[in-house]
Image: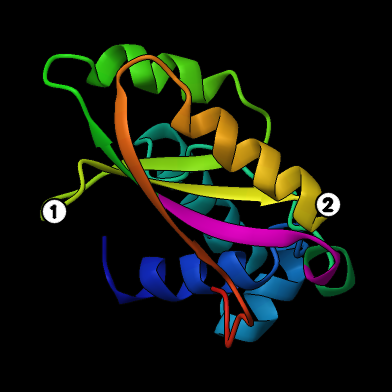
Amino acid sequence: MDDLDQHLLARLRDNARAPVAELARALGLSRTTIQSRLARLERSGVIAGYAVRLSQAREAALIHAFVMLTVEPKQASAVTAALKRLSGVRRLQSVSGPFDMIATVEAPNVSEMDGLIDEIGALKGVERTNSAIVLATKFDR
């Protein structure tokens, strides 16, 4: 990947639905150059897909939190599978430090967030949770 690929990816992060012609204008290149770059990035697996990004108003209407989990030894895969089935869990990452995993979760209101956090804490294999509610997002790339 070169600088052009990096700039192209940065533009796509801002708007994955940007037309090729718009990307070409912004980067000062031809449409065919941008199309071939995109095709190469897709074939090589650098671009795995394109996703929907919710509006700021929709995101602001949701309650977001990070739930740090301590998991019983050898239970990580079972806990991961259980968390994957919970629709409010948007991302799960294994981490170093005092916790084993961090789940990024969302819910439409505080009551449902409380229930979701309780549900996570009650999963077989979860020893302990510690939650942090997001108060504001300063920026999101």
On the question of residue 80 being in view, the answer is yes
The disc at residue 98 is: 1
What colouring style does the render use?
rainbow
Q: Residue 37 in magenta?
A: no
Q: Nearer the viewer, residue 138 or 9?
A: 138
From the viewer's perspective, tell me whether residue 84 is left or right of residue 71. right
Local SS, label 1: loop
On the question of residue 51 being in view, the answer is no
Q: Residue at x 34, y 36 (%)?
A: 44
Q: Residue at x 57, y 75 (%)?
A: 140
Q: Residue at x 49, y 25 (%)?
A: 83
Is there CB contact under 8 Å for labels 1 and 2?
no
From the viewer's perspective, tell me whether residue 103 is left or right of residue 86. left
Q: How would you classify the magenta stretch by its main secondary structure?
A: strand
**Quadrant location, the N terminus:** bottom left
The x and y percentages for residue 10 are: 50, 73
Q: Amino acid at mark 1?
A: Pro
Q: Nearer the viewer, residue 67 or 118?
A: 118
The x and y percentages for residue 134 are: 58, 71
Q: Which range of residues does the magenta coloring cover?
A: 60-67
The x and y percentages for residue 5 are: 39, 65
Q: Residue 62 in magenta?
A: yes
Q: Is residue 66 above or below residue 44?
A: below
Q: Is residue 62 above or below residue 48?
A: below
Q: Residue at x 75, y 49 (%)?
A: 52
Among the 4 quarters of the image, the one containing residue 94:
top left
From the viewer's perspective, tell me whether residue 20 is left or right of residue 54. left
Q: Earlier in the sequence, mark 1 or mark 2?
A: 1
Q: Is residue 93 above or below residue 56?
A: above
| Residue bearing the label numbered 2 | 108
From the viewer's perspective, tell me whether residue 4 is left or right of residue 52. left
**Quadrant location, the C terminus:** bottom right
